[in-house]
Amino acid sequence: MPIEEDRPLNSTPAAVDALSPVAPPPIAGTAPEERVRGYEAEAARRSTVHQLAAALVLASLFSMVPAVLDAVEHFRTAQSLGVSRWAFLLLLAGVLQIAYAVYMTQLPDWSTVWVVSLVTLGLAMVYAMLLGVFMLADQESEFVQILGLGDKLPGNRAAGWCLIMLSLSCLLAYATGRVSVRWHHAYRILHSAGVLSRK
């Protein structure tokens, strides 16, 4: 029968834990190198995300130019009927793009870039539908009257603007989608190789 070693009478629970083969759970105040770190994007990929966000902000500001000009004309004209509905929609779309650019910058990851790609692609689809409507509709169309674009149809000004924004949105959607897919592919390779699990 094994004989247990005598322990001092004044042994404390801390001393018993020290003799135990099971290590105690980590407590607050451990060294930074001992803490578990989450996934962090590389500096090069963060720089790419910042460039994409800057391009998205510039595109959104460019898309709001007609709305700003319409608002300025409204304030300069005493007999103005107010800011057009299409101007409010352009401003809303521009602010939404800026918000997603900030979102992508705050959380640089392939998934956030993919979300921005889908949003930009959806905006391109809206411009494509508007382009078709403006090319086929006339000034008496109910949809055109609701948006207040009756004076923008002559000369295909509204259709031309939609074509420009469609091309720009498709270019941004392609760029963000390509970056996201390549980033996700590299992430899966590193994860399967066990490189990310050691961080």
Image: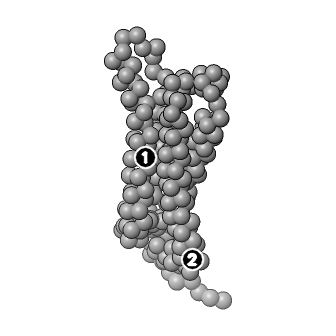
Is residue 26 at least partly visible in the picture?
no
Q: Nearer the viewer, residue 157 or 176?
A: 157
Amino acid type at image mark 1: Ala
- Between the residue at mark 2 and the residue at mark 1, the CA separation in whole angstroms equals 33 Å
Query: Which is nearer the N-term, disc 2 or disc 1?
Result: 1
Label 1 secondary element: helix
Q: Relative to 54, say whether 194 is above or below.
A: below
47 w.r.t. 56: above or below: below
Above or below, 58 relative to 38: above
Measuring 54% from the left and 53% from the top, which residue is drawn there? Answer: 170
Give the residue type that dot 2 points to: Ile
- Residue at 54% over, 69% down: 182
Dot 2 alpha-carbon crowd within 10 angstroms: few under 14, some 14 to 19, many 20 or more: few
Question: Which residue is situated farthest in the left direction here?
Answer: 76
Q: Residue at x 44, y 49 (%)?
A: 56
Q: Mark 1 points at which residue?
A: 59
- Which one is nearer the viewer's eye here, 45 or 143? 143
Q: For this rendering, which residue is in front, 76 or 152?
A: 152
141 horizontally vs 92: left or right: right
